[in-house]
């Protein structure tokens, strides 16, 4: 699943215009169906059944697409401004601990959690962390549901 997610992330980074295509109908083209089928096979191998795999797959595609859209938009805005474009940098300028204690705490610990991108892992830390927790949850759910 990590490999699949990394490939999809890379596609969105290389072809950001794909993120602007409305998500208002089921995937119809052979490439879209191939991406979905590969993901569903991973989820079914992990133990999810029919509708479970479809619901989980659509959630995961939406999460990757959403993070890629934010990443692309922040990158595009950095071309037109001197302001920081990383989410933590922007929020650090706006957030005070008294008003937003959860955000303040998360921002203060961002540097500790951030892992650099590597050639063998093009997935940014936010997606990597979320994907790992998603897989942990699927594994635990399948184990509990099938026992």
Image (cartoon, rainbow, N blue to C red):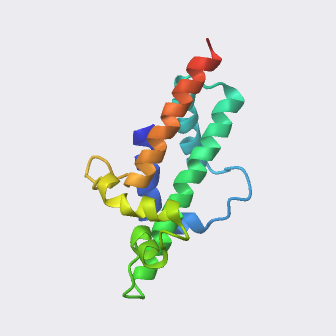
- Residue at 67 percent across and 64 percent down: it is 22
Percent position of residue 90, x then y:
44, 75
- Residue at 45 percent across and 65 percent down: it is 104
Q: Nearer the viewer, residue 132 or 32?
A: 132
Percent position of residue 118, x then y:
26, 52
- Residue at 59 percent across and 26 percent down: it is 141
Q: Residue furthest top?
A: 147
- Image quadrant assignment for residue 41: top right
Count how many numbered circles sit on residues in the image: 0
Q: Nearer the viewer, residue 70 or 53?
A: 70
Percent position of residue 107, x then y:
41, 63
Q: Does residue 56 sit above or below 76 in this rendering?
A: above
Is residue 15 among the parts visible in the rendering? Answer: no
Q: Does residue 124 sit above or below 30 in this rendering?
A: below
Q: Residue furthest bottom?
A: 81
Q: Residue furthest front?
A: 98
Q: Quadrant of the N terminus?
A: top left
Q: Quadrant of the C terminus?
A: top right
Is residue 2 among the parts visible in the rendering? Answer: yes
Q: Nearer the viewer, residue 46 or 14?
A: 46
Tell whether 72 sits left or right of 119. right
- Image quadrant assignment for residue 54: top right
Q: Does residue 42 sit above or below 96 in this rendering?
A: above
Percent position of residue 102, x then y:
51, 60
- Residue at 56 percent across and 42 percent down: it is 34
């Amino acid at each position: 699943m990590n490999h699949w997610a990394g490939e999809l992330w890379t596609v969105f980074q290389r072809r950001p215009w794909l993120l602007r295509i409305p998500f208002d109908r089921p995937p119809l083209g052979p490439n879209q169906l191939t991406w979905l089928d590969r993901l569903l096979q991973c989820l079914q191998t992990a133990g999810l059944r029919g509708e479970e795999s479809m619901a989980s797959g659509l959630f995961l595609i939406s999460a990757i697409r959403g993070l890629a859209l934010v990443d692309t938009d922040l990158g595009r805005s950095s071309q037109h401004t001197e302001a920081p474009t990383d989410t933590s940098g922007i929020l650090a300028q706006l957030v005070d601990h008294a008003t937003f204690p959860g955000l303040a705490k998360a921002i203060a610990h961002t540097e500790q959690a951030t892992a650099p991108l590597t050639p063998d892992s093009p997935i940014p830390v936010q997606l990597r962390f979320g994907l790992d927790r998603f897989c942990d949850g699927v594994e635990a759910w399948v184990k509990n549901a099938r026992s």
